[in-house]
Image: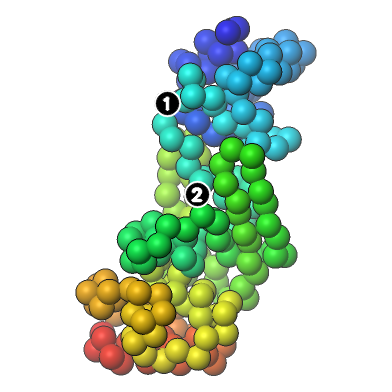
Amino acid sequence: MNNLAEYIKKSEIKSIFSLDNLKIFRMNEKKLNKELNELIKNDYILKINDDIYALGKSLRKEFVSQEILSYKFVPASYVSMEFVLSKISWIPESVYVVTCVTKNKNQDIKTKFFGNYEYINILQKSYLKGVQKYNYGINHFYRASPLKALADIIYDRKYEWKSLKPLNESLRIDYEDLETLKKEDFDELHENYNVKNVEEFLYGIRRELRV
């Protein structure tokens, strides 16, 4: 390994980083590029795209987060839909595509090392309603709440669901999980999508949950 590797070991870089993150080392640009390419060649660093990198296993200090990567690929996005529901164990199936909602165009991104990513454009008054920011060292990402993940599914699939029953029968979500939804969750999302089937879904399950 080289000087850059030693700098990284002592830094806050734990897994995913960009070229900008390496500027803190104040290395000559030519030397930096040479040592970076050397580390990539020997698998100490994995190049994901032109400006996103991940530390190889010998340098990595934490697992590579697909959620962080999803935001790195498309900053105007948040993770949602089945990916979120699987992450919080609301649905029993494992999800192998990281589904995100974006303000930008629909697109798919495939990576060699860290899975596949799907970005879906969903029109909303505010993309941040029902979304929480998560900070991890030098990186961060945004994740939909369980109710927002469900609303995004209803919007994207054009489902006409108005009760809890199809959530249990089709998505296999336990009623006990649905009963954790609170008044504030619904207040935040009502009229955010301005689409009939989503609004009817939110009003319908809220009525059943009596919140």
What residue lies at 44% left-to-right and 54% top-to-bottom? 133
Can residue 32 be seen?
no
Q: Is residue 133 above or below residue 186?
A: above
Q: Is residue 107 above or below residue 155?
A: above
Q: Quadrant of the C terminus?
A: bottom left
Instruction: Characterize the local packing of mark 1: few (<14), some (14-19) or many (20 or more) Cα atoms within 10 angstroms.
Output: some
Check disc 1 and give the amino acid type: Lys
- Residue at 63% from the left image edge and 16% from the top image edge: 42
Along the line of sight, the residue nearer the viewer: 18 or 2: 2
Q: In this orientation, does residue 23 appear?
A: yes
Q: Which dot marks residue 77?
A: none
Up the image or down, 94 lies above or below 157; here it is above
Of the numbered discs 2 and 1, the one sitting upstream in the chain is 1
Q: Residues within 10 Å of mark 2 (few under 14, many from 20)?
A: many
Residue lying at 61% horizontally and 21% vertically, measured from the top left: 43
Residue located beneath label 2 in the image: 67
Q: Amino acid at mark 2?
A: Glu
Residue 124: image location, x then y, percent: 58, 76
Image quadrant where one finds the N terminus: top right
Q: Distance between the Cα atoms at labels 2 and 1?
A: 17 Å
Residue 31 is situated, as x and y percent measured from the top left of the image, at: 72, 10
Task: Give residue 190's position: percent from left, percent from top.
Answer: 44, 83
**The label number, if any, that marks residue 61 in the structure image:** 1
